[in-house]
Image (tube, coloured by chain):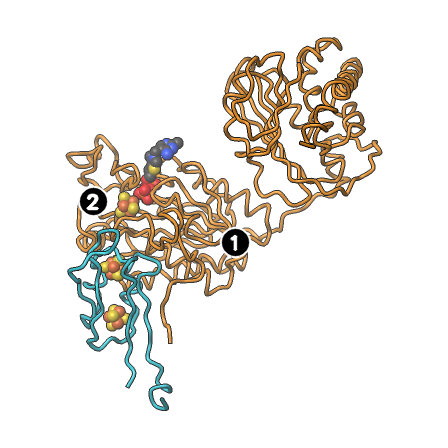
Chain colours: A cyan, B orange
Amino acid sequence: MQENYIEIEIEQCKGCRLCVETCPHHCIVQGSDINKMGYQYVRFVQNGCTACGFCYYICPEPGAITVIKADKREAVHG
Amino acid sequence: MVKHAKPKTFYETFERRGPGEKNTTYCPGCGHGNAHKLIAEVIAELGIQDRVIFCSPVGCSVFAYYYFDTGNVQCSHGRAPAVATGLSRARDNAIVISYQGDGDLAGIGMGAIMHAANRGEHMAVFFINNAIYGMTGGQMAPTTLVGQKTTTTPFGRTPGREGFPIRMCELINELQAPVYIERVSLGDAARIMRAKRAVKQALLNQVHKKGFSFVELLSPCPINWKMTPIEARKWLIDTMEPLFPVKVFRNIEEPPVKYEPPKILSDAELVDLFAATTEIEIPVSVREVEDQYIKIAGFGGQGVMSAGVFLANCAIKEGFNATWLPSYGPEMRGGTANASVIISNNQIGTPLVSSPNVLIAMNAPSLDTFEDTIVPGGLVIVNSSLVSRKLRREDVQAIYAPVTEIAKDVGLIAAASVVALTLYACISGAVQIETIQKVIPLSLKKKALVEVNLKAVEAAVEYYQKNLKEALVFSNMQ
Ligand SMILES: Cc1ncc(C[n+]2csc(CCOP(=O)(O)OP(=O)(O)O)c2C)c(N)n1
Ligand code: SF4
Ligand code: SF4
Ligand code: SF4
Ligand SMILES: [Mg+2]
C-alpha cells in the first residue's frame, strides 16, 4: 500500500531541526552530512507519516518540505 | 497527491542568494519565513496573486520582493503604511499588504501606522513582532520585554530608563476605523496553522473592501535572542505570549466607513483644477520612439528641474507617456541637482532612471557622477562651456556644445537648459522642435522670458545645423 511521505530538498534545509522536534511520529531525523551552505540537513524516515503538515508549517523555508498524501484510490486500484 | 508544497506565489528561485538559489536570506529558525509561507499560501488560495502589491519594510524582510512574485514596493523605514495608502487609493483593484517589523512599525514608523489605521485605509498589515531589531544586530525595540537583554539594554530593559513594551494591537484597538485586529503566534505548528486563518481573514477583508486589517504575528529571532531555533519557539510561547496575549481584538461585520472607489478626474476637470490651458495645436505623433531614459544634471539654479518638466510636457503633448522625477540636495542654489525623465510609447512602471541612455551634463560634477551609469551606445550632451574634460567612455556618443555660451549670446544664461534640450531634440528626434516652440509659451508667464527662450531654441537649432548635423551623419555612417 502506498504511504504518506514528505520530500526534503536538502539544499534548502537550514538544519534548524524545528521539523525534527515537531513531527508527532518522529519521521524526521537530523543526518550527519552537510549541504552546500554548510547546514546539517535533515532526513525523512518512514515511521507512519500521516501527512499532517506540521513539519511543512513549522519549516521557515518556502520549498524545503513537500508533503505527499497517499492517494487511497490509487492504492486500491494500483 | 501533493498536500503541502511551496506556494506558487513565491518565485521559483531567489536570485538574491545567487543564481538559481532557492532558500531565503533568513537565519535558521527565523519566523519571517513562516510568515512569508502563510501569506504566500493564502494569496495562492484566494487567487489574488496578480492583484497583490506587497509593501516591504526596512528590516530583515527588506528583500521580500526577491521572494514574492507579486507587485512589490520596498518602502523607506516605517513608511510602508503611507506607501500602501497611496497604492490602495490609486488602484481600486489592488490588494495591498504592508509587511513590517517591530522596529519599523512601532519605532520609526509609529506615526505612519497609527494614522493609516485611524483613517481605516484599505490594507492588510502583517506586523512581525520579534521584540528586537533583527537586521541591525539585536538592539532594543519598542516591543522588547522588560528584563530582556539586547545590545542596547545589556543588563535587560528597565522601564525607568527605556519605558515599557508597547502593545500595538491594544493601541490600535483604541481607534474607531479598523475592522479587524488579531494577534497570533508562530510558536509551534498548531499555532502557525491558526495564524493562517488570521492571514486569510485580513486578505479576504481586502477582497471584500472591508478596510484596515491588522495581524500581529509573534515571531522568533533566534540569532539575536541568542537561542537555538527550538529554544526560541519555546521562549516565544512561555515568555512572549503572556505579555502579548494571542487573541482576536476586533472583527467587525459592518465596516464603520463604507468603501468609496477612487474618483478619477476627467481631463476637463484636471485642466480646471490646475488652471491649465490647452490651447495649442500639436499634431499628435504616433511615432515609435525607443524608450528614452534621460538624466538632466547640473547645478541647482541652472534650470535642470524645469527643463525636465518641460521636456516631459513636450513629450506628453506629442502623445507619449512621460514621467519626471527631481532629485536635489537641501540647498536652493549651488548644490547639485538632477531630473530624471522617461519618454515612452508604453506605460512607465517607475519614474526612476538609474541607467540612462541620455545624459545631459550641464556641469563637470554631473559628468563625473553619471558618466559610468550610461548604457553603452547612449547619448551624452556635454555643456562644454563649463566642462573642460572629454568623456572617458568610448562606447557612448558624446556631443560637446557650448550650451551656456549659446544661451548667453541670446541674452539669458538661464536659458542654457533650453538650449541643451533643443540640441537633444535635434539629435534624437524624440520630440519635435515645433512642439518645444509651442510648449514654451505655456510654461512661462512673462512674455519677455518667452521671447528669449524661443530665441534660445532658434540659436540651438542653428548651432546644430552648423556644427553638429553633418558630423553626426558622418559618425553614424561609420
Ligand atoms: C531611516 C533609517 N533609520 C535606521 C535604519 C537602520 N535600521 C535598519 S533595520 C532597523 C530595525 C529593524 O528592526 P525590525 O523592524 O524589528 O525588523 P526585523 O529585522 O527585526 O525583522 C533599523 C533601525 C535605517 N535603515 N533607516
Ligand atoms: S507530515 Fe506530519 S507525520 Fe509526516 S513527516 Fe511531517 S510532521 Fe511528520
Ligand atoms: S524545519 Fe526546514 S529548514 Fe529546519 S531542519 Fe526542518 S527542513 Fe530543515
Ligand atoms: S536576525 Fe532575526 S529576524 Fe533577522 S533573519 Fe535572523 S533570525 Fe530572522
Ligand atoms: Mg524586529
Circles 2 and 1 on the same chain: yes
Looking at the rendered structure, the kind of residue marked 2 is: Trp
Q: Pick whichever, B447 or A41, lies toward us.
A: A41
Quadrant in the picture for residue B278: top right
Expressed as whole percent of the image width and height from the top left, the position of residue B314 reads 73, 31
**For residue B303, side relative to residue A44 (left or right):** right
Residue B287: which quarter of the image? top right
* Residue sitting at x 68%, y 21%: B420
Q: Residues within 10 Å of mark 2 (few under 14, many from 20)?
A: many
Left or right? Give the position of A71 relative to A27: right
Q: Please report the residue visible at 72 percent of the width from the left and 36 percent of the height from the top.
A: B316
Q: Which residue is mark 2?
A: B225
Residue A30 position, x and y percent, is 17, 62
**Front-lying residue, B401 or B95:** B401
Relative horizontal placement of residue B39, taking residue B122 as reference (left or right): left
Q: Which residue is at the front of the view, B225 or B449?
A: B449
Find out if the beta carbon at label 2 lies less than 8 Å from the nearest ligand 4 atom: yes
Viewer-nearest residue: A25 or B399: B399
Residue B95, which numbered label?
Answer: 1
